[in-house]
Amino acid sequence: MRFLFLALLPLVLGHVEDFSAEAVARRNEFQIANRRALLECRDHFHKREVGIAQRAVERRQDLLSKARRLAGISNEKRSLTDVLNKNHKTNHTGVTPNTDPSTFITPTCVLGQEGEVGPFYVNGELIQTDLRAGQAGVDVYLDFQVIDVSTCNPVSGLYIDLWGANATGHYSAVAADGGTANLKTNHGRGIQLTDSDGVVQYLSHFPGHYSGRTNHLHIIANSNGTLFSNGTFKASTVKHHTQLFWDQSLITQVEALSPYSGNTTPLTTNAVDRVLAGEAATFDPVLEYTFVGSNAASGIIAWISIGINVNQAETVSAASTWTANGAVTNSGGGGPPGKK
C-alpha cells in the first residue's frame, strides 16, 4: 500500500501555471514541510495496534469478494501479490490478505504540486455510490482512504467528490462537452462521506479518453458545505484536489473493449499527458488494482490511500451546479474547454 498526498492546488482560471520565483519557493517550502510530516507518520503506521492498515486490507478484500459475487465469479482466495507485483506494483512480494500489514506498509513520497481541477467540475452533486447511470463500460470498484499527515489518523467527515469521462470520453452535466442535453445527465459523478476509517467507496466505469488527455479521474475533498434533503451536497470550501491515473498496460486492455474501441479520437498515452507529467514530478498518482475475474472485461478493483493536510483550503470554480432539474451552467465557471 502506498500513500498519495493531495497538496493544496491553487487554481488559476485558464489553468496557466505560475513559474515565478515566489511560486516555486512556495511549492518547495510546502513540499519539504509535508515530506517531514509524512515521514513522521511512517513509524506510527508500522505499529501493529494502529489497525488502520489491517482494516484496509480486509476492506479491499471484501470489496473484491462482493464484486465477484455480483459478476457470478467464484470467490477463490487470491493474494494481493497478484496485484502489487504486476503492472502498478509494490516493491514488496509475498503479500496476502493474511500478511501482517506492518511488513509492507511503507508510505512513500506523496506530495502534490500546483495543478488544475479541470473545467468540468460540477457542484451540488448527488451523494451516491453507484455512478454508472445506465451507461456502458467496464465496471470499476474504487476504494479511497484519507489520512491526515499531521496526526497520522484517518480523516472522517470529508465529502469526497469523484468524476470522470464516460467510455467514449465525454463528461456529464456540462454543456461544453455535449450541449444542453448533456446537462440532464450525471453519469460518472458522485459524492461520498468518509467514514471513521477515512474511507469512501464507489462503483463507476473505467474512464474513457479524449483529445489531449490520457484516461484519468478527478477527486476533490470538501470539508464545508450544505447537505440538502434531496441527497445532494453543495461545497463551499475545498480542502484538496487531484487527478488519478491508470497503468498504460491496463488502459490498452480496456481500450480494446467495446464501447471504448469505438472512440476514434487519437489516444494520448501516459508518457505524453501533461497533467500526469506534472504530478509525477513529486508523487505517484497511479491507482493500484486487480481484476474482478481473469481480465479487465470482468471488472476492476482499484484503490489508493491519500494523505492530506487538513489545515489547507481553496475555493474552486464549478462549470455547473446540479439541481433537481439537472445541471445549470455557471457563468464563467469551470475554465475553458480543452483543459480537462
Image (cartoon, rainbow, N blue to C red):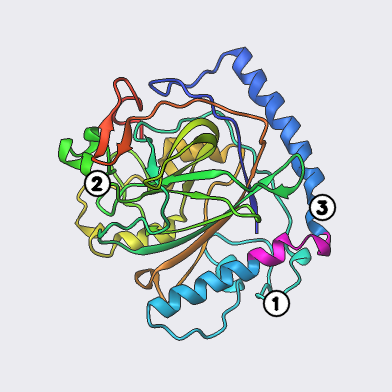
Q: Which residue is mark 3?
A: 44
Residue 240 lies, in percent from the top left, at 56, 35
Q: CA distance from mark 1 to mark 3?
A: 20 Å
User: Which residue is more in the foreground, 74 or 216?
Assistant: 74
Q: Nearer the viewer, residue 334 or 250?
A: 334
Membership of 54 in magenta stretch: yes
Is 52 placed left or right of 69 in the picture?
Answer: right
Image disc number at residue 185: 2
Query: In the image, what residue type sits under mark 3?
Result: His
Q: CA distance from mark 2 to mark 1?
A: 42 Å
| N-term-proximal mark, 3 vs 2 | 3
Q: Which mark is residue 98?
A: 1
Magenta-tinted stretch: 47-56
Residue 85 visible here:
no
* Residue 297 among magenta residues: no
- Asked if the residue under mark 3 is in contact with the one under mark 1, i.e. CB atoms within 8 Å, the reply is no
Looking at the rendered structure, the kind of residue marked 2 is Thr
> Which amino acid type is marked by label 1?
Asn
Badge 1 element: loop
Q: Residue furthest front?
A: 229
| SS label for mark 2 | loop
Regarding residue 152, the answer to whether it shows in the image is yes
Question: How many other residues sit within 10 Å of disc 1, few (<14), some (14-19) or many (≥20)?
Answer: few
Residue 181 rendering spot, x and y as whole percentages: 16, 41
How many other residues sit within 10 Å of disc 2, few (<14), some (14-19) or many (≥20)?
some
Horizontal relation, residue 33 to residue 215: left or right: right
Q: In terms of depth relative to the viewer, which is nearer, 236 or 9?
A: 236
SS for callout 3: helix
Of marks 2 and 1, which one's residue comes earlier in the chain?
Answer: 1
Question: What secondary structure predominates along the stretch shown in magenta?
Answer: helix
Q: CA distance from mark 3 to mark 2?
A: 44 Å
